[in-house]
Amino acid sequence: MSTIIELKEISFSYGNRKILDKVNMTINSGEFISIAGESGSGKSTLLYILARFIKPDSGAYLFENSRPSWAPFFRRKNIGFLFQDFRLLPFLTVEKNIAFPQYFSGRHIQQSTIRELMSKLNIESRRKAKPDSISGGEAQRTALARALLMNPKILLLDEPSGNLDAETEKKLIQIFLDLRNEGKTLICVTHSAEIMKASDRILDLKNSVFVERTGKKPGGKKAGIK
Ligand SMILES: Nc1ncnc2c1ncn2[C@@H]1O[C@H](COP(=O)(O)OP(=O)(O)O)[C@@H](O)[C@H]1O
Ligand SMILES: [Mg+2]
């Protein structure tokens, strides 16, 4: 399996408060990783560093074994980000929210691709609705479809099942597994035992460093493969 992301001795502070302290992390292409850790431990900050929204104070970030390109370009090409609060644009329909990223990227996306995405995420019947009239699960799938529009290699997911009921969460996990089986790399910050169980590896962020959780997942990598 090839390495897609490598963090070497990454440190980051907000002001004089250290959030990440020489963090090392290697992620293989096609892995589904869960990141756990107490509230305030720096999980979202780590996702922002992976997406290159923020720059670490020190350390190296390698993408496919080399230094990544200019951050906005890198992000457009490689990263899909699902924010914890979805960040849908309230004045646009579901369909237009999903279609939105192409206007930044300068790459036209076929209407048929958008239709396929909506159908895959079971949101097509709501395509004309505005975000304030859809359910939490639908908003989440809309945000996920938007994150997938430009066909990124990596999906960064910030507590995606925070407000979902068990049944909706189960469907979401199946979508994650399908994406993983299509070859995407998923990095998911979560408190959900179900998501952790479905993922290939669990990393705990604790005291500003990562600890790999072992021995908790019967079947390991096999778990979740259909
Ligand atoms: N922009 C910011 N400025 C200063 N402190 C911040 C900022 N964003 C987050 N923090 C603090 O950094 C710590 C880590 O935040 P975060 O990465 O959001 O944690 P988590 O996602 O694990 O809950 C928290 O204590 C938070 O209050
Ligand atoms: Mg967070």
Image (spheres, rainbow, N blue to C red):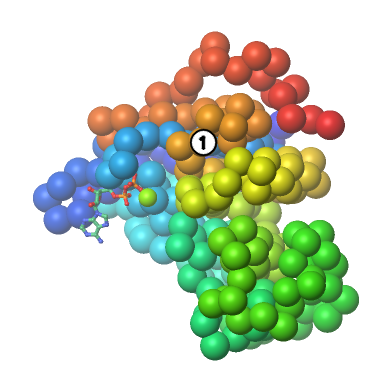
Q: In this view, does 97 lie above or below 176?
A: below
Q: Which residue position holds label 1?
A: 192
Q: Is residue 70 above or below residue 50?
A: below
- The answer to whether residue 178 is seen in the rendering is yes
At a point 65% along the width and 48% down the height, the residue shown is: 168
At a point 52% along the width and 82% down the height, the residue shown is: 90
- The answer to whether residue 65 is seen in the rendering is no
Task: Find residue 162 and report its horizontal and vertical position in percent.
Answer: 48, 48
Please state which amino acid type lies under the numbered disc 1. Answer: Ser
Task: Find residue 66 and report its horizontal and vertical position in percent.
Answer: 56, 49
Task: Find residue 122 and report its horizontal and vertical position in percent.
Answer: 78, 61
Classify mark 1: helix, strand or loop: loop
At a point 12% along the width and 50% down the height, the residue shown is: 16
- Name the image quarter holding the C terminus: top right
Q: Nearer the viewer, residue 71 or 158?
A: 158
Q: In which quarter of the image is residue 105?
A: bottom right
Q: In this view, does 220 lie to the left or right of 209?
A: right
Q: Quadrant of residue 197?
A: top right
- Name the image quarter holding the N terminus: top right
Q: In this view, does 13 lie to the left or right of 167?
A: left
Q: In this view, does 75 lie above or below 7?
A: below
Q: In this view, does 74 lie to the left or right of 138?
A: left
In the rendered image, the residue lying farthest to the right is 112
At a point 59% along the width and 36% down the height, the residue shown is: 195
